[in-house]
């Protein structure tokens, strides 16, 4: 069976414009990336990239220019450009037809629709080069293909907030099947009015910073991000995708099953695929959204899978925001940095008032050194989990090469 190696992660989010900046924010518990935004006449905290995002000249890629002004394309361009050297080498090595793209996203089309609708109301007509295709789920992935002249498969995964992780699995499958030799895989999403309204109607959005696994939690903070890897079977880094697991419990359109059985199946499938026991996992990046239902279901699932061998764990969403379709790839990138840099584990930012109904061994903030966490241990294998609407559950296990026993 082919091994799957993950390149250095390319990313941009409110907690960093690259992987190094994000890792530093996760180590220190830096939550300065959050801003106050007004939606539906209410103020809420959201993880928003504050830096300028240059407009993308799509005509340079033989695409109409309208969509180049959208935030989702700007963010994807800023992130995937960081992979340029890896991608160009892969194209030279394997050919354009053997390089593929797998992108996960929740909502990458309503922004283009809203911009066009606004122009129509103000001017009586849509922008001259506007096209409904810009609203399709596939367009951002097609943009990446045009950007690099890639001729291999272009796939979009839409498994709600597990989409970024699902895209990584689909990319690994393309390589293992021999269809591709290299795949750009990851996810991207922004905090659009449409997304916010949907979560707000569900009463899932917090007007304060999120507080996962606390008895005082009030919900999620939405965030925007793009995160990508280049996947190859030839070694391009020391970090491997060891195992993957998916389940679909279909318990409810938005709520997780109370018994956590769907996440349990995904985690156990990933452990089996990786060929490791639960006791070999050194760190878990939790789904950790900060909603009552999600936290309790995840806690139950973790206790079922790990029992007394529960490793250190933390949710990094209080640092990045819940980046939806990008979350699976962004949190895999955080685990990549933990394994590669060996400088400690991401802290869990919360008020420390545990919910006895949702106990988890969380990575603490150090009381002696401000917000710098103690190095609990140098991990060899990490698990990252994403549990999404519709019962779409994904677990990824990654580790350092030759360091998994």
Image (cartoon, rainbow, N blue to C red):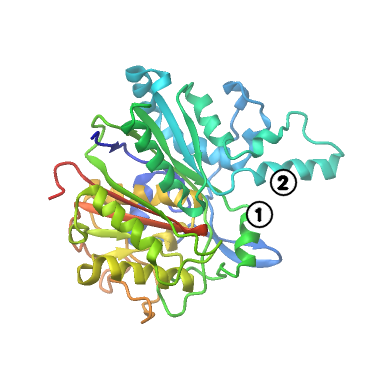
The residue tagged with tag 2: helix, strand or loop? helix
Identify the residue at horizontal 63%, vertical 40% (top origin): 70
Q: Earlier in the sequence, mark 1 or mark 2?
A: 2
Report helix, strand or loop for mark 1: helix
Q: Is residue 385 toward the left or the right of residue 121 in the image?
A: left
Q: Note whether residue 270 is visible.
A: yes
In percent of width and height, residue 148 lies at: 47, 24
Q: Residue 114 carries which label?
A: 2
Residue 337 located left or right of residue 253: left
Residue plotted at (87% across, 39% down):
124
The disc at residue 194 is 1
The answer, for residue 365, to whether it is visible in the render is no
* Residue found at x 63% / y 43%: 109
Residue sitting at the far right: 124
Q: Pointer 1 and pointer 2: residues touching (CB < 8 Å)?
A: yes
The image quarter containing residue 61 is top right
Displayed quadrant of residue 4: top left
Q: Where is residue 349 in the image (x, y as percent from the top left)?
A: 38, 68
Percent across and percent down for residue 191 are 58, 53
**Rounded to the nearest whole Å, what is the CA distance between mark 1 and mark 2?**
9 Å
């Amino acid at each position: 069976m082919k091994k799957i190696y993950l390149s250095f992660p390319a990313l941009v989010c409110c907690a960093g414009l690259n992987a190094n900046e994000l890792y530093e924010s996760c180590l220190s518990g830096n939550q300065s990336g959050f801003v106050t935004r007004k939606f539906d006449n209410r103020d809420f905290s959201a993880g928003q990239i504050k830096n300028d995002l240059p407009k993308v000249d799509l005509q340079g890629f033989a695409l109409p220019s309208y969509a180049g002004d959208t935030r989702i394309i700007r963010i994807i361009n800023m992130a995937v450009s960081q992979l340029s050297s890896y991608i160009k080498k892969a194209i030279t090595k394997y050919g354009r037809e053997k390089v593929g793209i797998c992108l996960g996203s929740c909502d990458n089309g309503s922004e283009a629709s809203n911009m066009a609708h606004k122009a129509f109301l103000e001017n009586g007509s849509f922008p001259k080069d506007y096209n409904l295709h810009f609203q399709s789920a596939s367009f951002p992935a097609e943009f990446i293909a045009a950007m690099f002249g890639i001729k291999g498969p272009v796939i979009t995964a839409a498994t709600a907030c597990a989409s970024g992780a699902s895209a990584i699995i689909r990319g690994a499958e393309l390589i293992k099947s021999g269809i591709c030799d290299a795949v750009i895989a990851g996810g991207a999403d922004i905090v659009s009015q449409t997304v916010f309204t949907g979560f707000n109607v569900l009463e899932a959005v917090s007007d304060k910073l999120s507080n996962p696994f606390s008895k005082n939690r009030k919900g999620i903070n939405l965030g925007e991000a793009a995160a990508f890897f280049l996947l190859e079977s030839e070694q391009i880094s020391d970090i491997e995708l060891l195992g993957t697991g998916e389940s679909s419990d279909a318990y409810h359109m938005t709520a997780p099953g109370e018994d956590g059985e769907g996440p349990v199946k995904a985690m156990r499938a990933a452990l089996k695929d990786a060929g490791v026991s639960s006791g070999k996992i050194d760190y878990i990046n939790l789904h950790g959204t900060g909603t009552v239902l999600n936290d309790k279901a995840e806690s139950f699932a973790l206790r079922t899978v790990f029992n007394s061998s529960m490793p250190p764990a933390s949710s990094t969403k209080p640092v990045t925001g819940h980046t939806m379709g990008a979350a699976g790839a962004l949190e895999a990138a955080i685990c990549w940095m933990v394994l590669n840099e060996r400088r400690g584990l991401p802290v869990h930012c919360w008020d420390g008032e545990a919910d006895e109904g949702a106990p988890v061994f969380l990575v603490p903030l150090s009381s002696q050194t401000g917000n710098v966490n103690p190095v609990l241990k140098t991990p060899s294998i990490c698990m990252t989990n994403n549990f999404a609407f519709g019962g779409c559950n994904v677990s990824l296990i990654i580790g350092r090469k030759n360091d998994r026993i």
